[in-house]
Image (tube, rainbow, N blue to C red):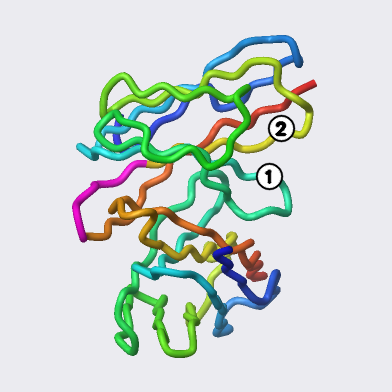
Amino acid sequence: EDKVVQSPLSLVVHEGDTVTLNCSYEVTNFRSLLWYKQEKKAPTFLFMLTSSGIEKKSGRLSSILDKKELFSILNITATQTGDSAIYLCAVEVNAGGTSYGKLTFGQGTILTVHP
Amino acid sequence: ETGVTQTPRHLVMGMTNKKSLKCEQHLGHNAMYWYKQSAKKPLELMFVYNFKEQTENNSVPSRFSPECPNSSHLFLHLHTLQPEDSALYLCASSHWGSGATYEQYFGPGTRLTVT
């Protein structure tokens, strides 16, 4: 059974801190790993990673994938209160010969940033 | 309207009621998905439609019945639900292409409470 595990489950920091969120996975037929941010309802897409060692960056957020060790990290530097959210990691697998994106999600990391 | 929209945003129903959830995507995608998000559990994939054809039913009970009349609209018909079906139901859409991988975009969800 495919499995995605995120750590920590929750994290409380102060504005300006740097945080690292972890995602490890055990899946068959890996295609990609995705990070989402969920604030109130809709998860919003952050990054898609398919190749090891290539950092994806967007402003203060960055992410990297290690396909040998089967994990990814999401870094947020100079955190702001607006970064408070649940961060979801999902792994896309090939499913039964079809080519759609079957996503298996981790349980999420709840990040709280205090002023 | 832009992105992925869902109606209603909140729904309270009794166990003998019949109701439907609606999802519409304005992104020109050809794949649509239903997910269930329960408290303390990871997002769970329920159904996948590709070009209006159902390609995945992730062992979902028959009291949940999906319908996809075209590639922009997706419904989830509900009948004789159980209290444990109370959850946030999220719709998502993406492009679909053989061998390619595309991120999924989520709607705001319907918060369902079964009494």
On whether disc 1 and disc 2 are found on a single subunit, the reply is yes
Side (left or right) of A12 relative to A45: right
What chain does mark 2 sit on? B
Q: Quadrant of the rendered structure where residue A50 is?
A: bottom left
Q: Which residue is mark 2?
A: B86
Residue in view at x 45 percent, y 28 percent: B6
Q: Position of residue A92 (x, y in %)?
A: 40, 62
Q: Are marks 1 and 2 in contact (CB under 8 Å)?
A: yes
Secondary structure beneath dot 2 equals loop
| Disc number for residue B38 | 1
* Of the image marks 1 and 2, the number of the one nearer the N terminus: 1
Residue in view at x 40 percent, y 82 percent: A65
**Which sits in the foreground, B92 or B3?**
B92
- The residue range painted magenta reads B93-99
Q: Amino acid at mark 1?
A: Ser
Q: Position of residue A94 (x, y in %)?
A: 36, 60
What chain does mark 1 sit on? B
Prevalent SS, magenta region:
loop
Asked if the stretch drawn in magenta spans residue B94, the answer is yes
| Disc number for residue A63 | none
Q: Amino acid at mark 2?
A: Ser
Residue in view at x 72 percent, y 48 percent: B39
Q: Residues within 10 Å of mark 2 (few under 14, many from 20)?
A: many
